[in-house]
Image (cartoon, rainbow, N blue to C red):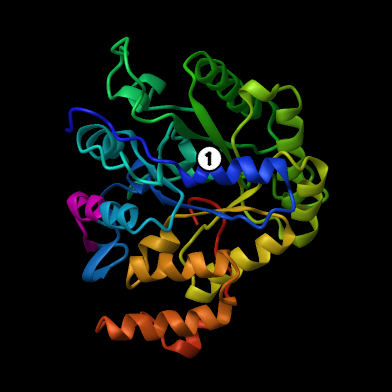
Amino acid sequence: MTAARHEAAKTLDAKVARLRADPRCRDFIIADAKDADMAFGLAAPGPAVGGDRQRGPFRSLADFREQIREIVSQGFVDVMLMSASTSDVLAREERLFDGSPVTPAVRMNDTTDIWLAAGSGTYPRQPALPFSTASIPHAQWGRLEPPGRGRPVVDLGLFSITLNGDAAADRAMLTAYRDFRHEAERNGFRHFLEVFFPNALAEDGTAAPLGVARFVADHVVRALAGVPAAGRPVFLKIPYLGPEVTAQLAAYDPTLIIGILGGAAGTTHDAFALVAESKRSGARVALFGRKINAAEHQLEFVRHLRAVADEHLPAAEAVRSYHAAIGKHGLAPHRSLEDDLAITHTAAAYCG
């Protein structure tokens, strides 16, 4: 650890300021969600070379963290989301983000619908219940009691909720979010809000008669209506709700920055096209975890993702360029170029 921290301008802060000043701004924020160890257990880092996605062998936690170091050093993402334990090593012990334009963030809760260890049974299909392993002081300082001096190492966290149209379960979820916001405001801790699609919605559809996209958008608006500026999220992380509902949400409150989550890995074109289409609809953030982690070459994938987000390359052209780039690295693609140019349906729930 260095004796003094070198503060660097963070691209997240600059982009958020510009987007709030001018909602028509074309800035786009990319976050790498390297918090899968809060959900998947051994499989979180992804399969090792030749490994099976379900049975392994898997990459190690050390490999996982080394990939984070490389992506932060590259500087094309604006936010690196981690578990509290990984942040403790990289942000606090190593000071990886000192002097970096990348902002570190910590996943602040792990609701039951992301308890995805092998053999977890029906957790992902039961109505989600609130739970938090991490605390705000642990995220900020790596310890329960703040030292009483200096600035926290991390001042940004992700809080996640899943609503299902069940009054008791949804009240518990929103109560947990309210309590977190109050503690965060007292501690000067910023957050972004993740809202998943329902994981246990009634099959008759009565809880979402206008569809799950409208269900999520309406709940976001309603939940934040009672939250003043001091407690509001920096941005949202929600499934892509399609062009119509996303545009409506963006127009409803231009100060609310919409971010889309990636869901399952899918094809390379799935990832690039999702960024391009969601940006056209009003989103200004993409938070991809498995889509980045499953790539043949994560640095090349992120580089091309940035080119699409900044409108330097169309999605399909970026897929072709990515394949050419990984070929130069001597890597075999997971799919043929033709197959990787396909658009498939990728799940937008964490358990998908």
Residue beneath the point at 44% across and 41% down: 9
The answer to whether residue 63 is magenta is yes
Q: Quadrant of residue 52?
A: bottom left
**Pick the front one: 57 or 91:** 91
Q: Count the numbered circles shown.
A: 1
Q: Amino acid at mark 1?
A: Asp
Rendered view: 89 above or below 143 = below
Q: Quadrant of residue 331?
A: bottom left
Is residue 269 visible in the rendered image? The answer is yes
Residue 132 at what x, y percent from top left?
43, 27
Residue 27 at what x, y percent from top left?
61, 55
Q: Is residue 248 left or right of residue 179?
A: right
The answer to whether residue 93 is magenta is no
Q: Which residues are magenta?
A: 56-66
Residue 278 at what x, y percent from top left?
66, 61
Q: Secondary structure at mark 1?
A: helix
Residue beneath the point at 52% across and 21% down: 180
Residue 209 at what x, y percent from top left?
82, 48
Is residue 129 visible in the rendered image? The answer is no
Q: Residues within 10 Å of mark 1 (few under 14, many from 20)?
A: some
- Label 1, on which residue? 13
Rendered view: 224 above or below 66 = above
Rendered view: 12 above or below 273 = above
Residue beneath the point at 48% across and 74% down: 268
**Pick the front one: 324 or 123:** 324
Residue beneath the point at 18% across and 33% down: 2
Q: Is residue 350 left or right of residue 53?
A: right
Rendered view: 295 above or below 83 = below
Q: Give the quarter of the figure containing the N terminus.
A: top left
